[in-house]
Amino acid sequence: EAYIPKIIEVNYIEGSSDKQWSSKNFPWTKKLEANNKKVFGNHSFRPNQREVINATMSGCDVFVLMPTGGGKSLTYQLPALICPGVTLVISPLVSLIQDQIMHLLQVNIPAAYLSANMDWTEQQEILRELSSDYCKYKLLYVTPEKVAKSDVLLRHLDNLHSRELLARIVIDEAHCVSQWGHDFRPDYQGLGILKQKFSNTPVLALTATATASVKEDVVQALGLVNCIVFRQSFNRPNLWYSVIPKTKKSLEDIDRFIKENHFDECGIIYCLSRMDCEKVAEKLQECGHKAAFYHGSMDPAQRALVQKQWSKDDINIICATIAFGMGINKPDVRFVIHHSLPKSIEGYHQECGRAGRDGQRSSCVLYYSYSDYIRVKHMISQGAIEQSPFASGYNRNNFANSGRILETNTENLLRMVSYCENDVDCRRLLQLVHFGEKFDSGTCKKTCDNCLRIKSLIEKDVTEIAKQLVELVKLTGQQFSSSHILEVYRGSLNQFVKKHRHDTLSLHGSGKHITKGEASRVLRHLVIDDFLVEDVKKSDIYRSVSSVLKLNESKVRNLLAGGQTITLRFPSPIKASKFGKSEITPAKGSLTSGKLSPPQSDTPAQPQPEGDLNL
Ligand code: ADP
Ligand code: MG
Ligand code: ZN
């Protein structure tokens, strides 16, 4: 019999609060409020915390979607404290678990964890305590691997359960269950066994990132019953978003941006590779910033030191791979800069989410160049990209190169590209749509670059341009990069064009009258919409990668046969020239209203040639 999850959504996005769960008349309300103050030192509850606690304490299965920093831990730690028995918490990372346990012990809540690389005698001691009559632990943390691989653990859970001392099962970072998510961990899929074995024990699944399909996946895989979903808006009104073309002088741009907008303030710069981290940190140090780098090949002690210096403000800026960020609770991060393309919108949203936890205005700036896309894509296909700490080694080594995971990763990356390429729609809208949330871009109030820019837009039919570009890819034998195709299209007579005799093609120069930016946007659109496929070509001799455009035959056939029109929105040229460039991109040093936009360099980087990227 097929399992059909029944989901009751308590949707707080549109402000319809469900009175049932926000009631202050539950038998435990007084105790809840007292302990929240006395033990955790909180003066009140944050949005949805009370509701989630009431629902889980009523015995329901609950799924919580709450942004990073929203306060998910409290929703199970507080119930764990006031309910009899032990709460089992599954969490993906030992370092994260250790951090939590340290905090719990500080406020005198007994907690322990089990992990595979722990001393066996130590593990036995904890297990013995679990089976004792008066088990002191209120919370037991384990990694998902432990559930999957340890029969001993399951036996002890069974034992707790039979004595009615298994209070609750918590799945933290629940999106790791889903292959559609950006941090899939195979061991999370095995967690369905918990609900099978302990069907009357309430399950609480928590995540900061889940699209509708990820949510369905999680509910299904965990076997949640009549699950109540609490979600709240992922919009972070105090974060200002912008995407800036990445130039060859991107490091100078970053230096200037920080000096002009966040001097001596705290920030994170996310970089793609370990080498990038070190280079960026060094450059910023030269420019007089207190910067350091942080990545996966540093030894743990070194990493811990950097993180500590950063939390004590001895260091302002951390240049890091996405391995950095876990358990970071620094409230006054004033900026998050992406030095290169993030690998998914979920990842991007989460990384930006580390800024401005104190609610103060903070900047999120992404430096984008199309050539970074080629680079990230290549690294993903090689499994060479540094993962967020959630993702297991298994994920990276065994799965990165194969089938569905690679496809999902590439698709996630393409969505990110299209986010960056979009210079029209509200950034908040673009992000929130991705999380299945409705958003009125009027509420952005010009706190993103696209809303800030004064422009009127016109819809343009670009079908003819698209057809010509596709024909050109075909004519040149599907072996050239997009920048080369654009050169030929716009009638370039450079050496390379001549050498390949592309100056003699019928379509050479047929796009003379079209601006480079416009032509390249159409070409990108053709890739994003799957008419053209970007293939990575790697040269072993030069240790470089370049991209080659190929045709997606079936879609292209339809397009050329006239079966499709393609329209894109462009800024109206009349408005743009009337207001002048300075209205759109604030001039150097005049960042009054447009604080979030760093000054632009003189050389625009878009589009960049994508050949010869040394990895
Ligand atoms: P999440 O897991 O959702 O990312 P955490 O549970 O780690 O967030 O909480 C983030 C921070 O918010 C922690 O420092 C925590 O102490 C704080 N916090 C949580 N709930 C409250 C509250 N009701 N009042 C004040 N601070 C809170
Ligand atoms: Mg958390
Ligand atoms: Zn906006």
Image (tube, rainbow, N blue to C red):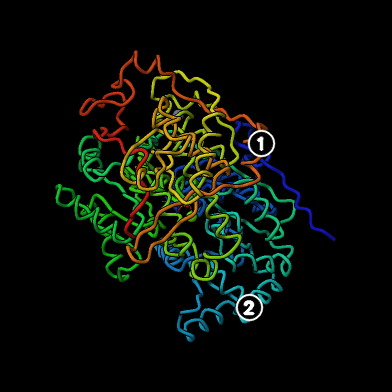
Element marked by disc 1: helix
* Image coordinates for residue 399, horizontal then vertical, percent: 55, 67
Question: Which is nearer the N-term, disc 2 or disc 1?
Answer: 1
Query: Residue at the location (46% across, 65% down)?
Result: 97
Q: Mark 1 points at which residue?
A: 19
Q: In this view, does 444 lie to the left or right of 176?
A: left
Can you tell which mark lies on residue 156? 2
Element at label 2: helix
Q: Position of residue 47 (x, y in %)?
A: 53, 40
Residue for point 42% across, 51% down: 374
Task: Say which quarter of the image contains residue 254.
Answer: top left
Disc 2 residue type (three-letter): His
Q: Where is residue 109 in the image (x, y as percent from the top left)?
A: 47, 64
- Looking at this view, is 39 or 88 the one in front? 88
Task: Work out which residue is located at the far right of the displayed protein and give it.
Answer: 1
As drawn, 388 above or below 575: below
Q: Please state the horizontal and vertical placement of residue 341, each as a whole percent of the image.
A: 40, 48
Q: Which residue is drawn at 42% across and 32% down?
A: 509
Q: On the rendered image, what quadrant is the C terminus found in?
A: bottom left
Q: How many marks?
A: 2
- Can residue 129 be seen from the camera position used here? yes
Is 175 in front, or is 33?
A: 175
**509 vs 246, nearest the viewer:** 509
Q: Please tell me in which quadrant of the rendered image residue 450 appears.
A: top left
- Residue at mark 1: C-beta within 8 A of ligand 1: no
Counting other residues with Cα less than 10 Å from the Cα at mark 2, is it few (<14), some (14-19), or many (20 or more)?
some
Q: Do the residues labelled 2 and 1 touch (CB within 8 Å)?
A: no
